Image (cartoon, rainbow, N blue to C red):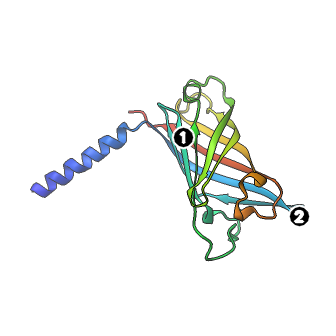
Amino acid sequence: MKAIVISSLLFFSATILLAQQSKYVTHNSLMKIKASKNAESLEWENKNVSVNLDYKTGEFITYLTNTDFVKPDQDNYMTKESDAPRRQLTLEGTLPISDIINQKQETQNYKVELHLNIDELNLSETILFDMLITRPETGESKSYRMFTLNGILYNDQTNLPAFQGYDNEIQIWLLFSGFMNVQ
């Protein structure tokens, strides 16, 4: 009986702690990369993306792994070598959260700088993104938003091994939707 009471207390404590977090609950996250090589346009996507957005501070961070990028509707991985090192990538920065929460128009555009970090390569690069935020029509949740970020990664500045031989401009798209976890 004592074990049940202790387990219940731990469960409820964890539930209350999670409910109090000021995070946008995100889902349907996707990152796309478009690049050109020898006049051929190539595209990869990664659906294994974790997005965290604090709706009180605007702190934003996205976690993904280089080996999870595949060509859409195919099983061709961006990293061709089976023994390629698995690298954790993050995109992080601060979004204009007050403007996002109080958005009156159906769509709103912003320019935001996010930092691409790959610790294993000692890489930290700032990327300017065009961010489009769409608020659903009235009648739906007032806290629900759809985010589309589009930025350019310059190959000559980063020299990422995966993009050797590709044109200089690598286009990055991050798409996700979410709602405020308000209790």
Q: Residue furthest bottom?
A: 82
Q: CA distance from mark 1 to mark 2?
A: 35 Å
The quadrant the N terminus occupies is bottom left
The answer to whether the residue labelled 1 contacts the one labelled 2, judged by CB atoms less than 8 Å apart, is no
**Amino acid at circle 1:** Phe
Q: 81 and 159: which one is in front?
A: 159
> In the rendered view, does 136 fall on the left or right side of 37?
left
**Amino acid at circle 2:** Asn
Q: 128 and 78: which one is in front?
A: 128
> In the rendered view, does 156 fall on the left or right side of 23?
right
Q: Residues within 10 Å of mark 2 (few under 14, many from 20)?
A: few
First of labels 1, 2 by sequence position:
2
What label does residue 38 carry, if any?
Answer: 2
In the picture of the structure, the residue carrying the numbered disc 1 is 60
On screen, 91 above or below 136? below
Locate residue 158, reporting x and y percent: 71, 54
Locate residue 173, reporting x and y percent: 70, 48
Q: 10 and 183: which one is in front?
A: 10
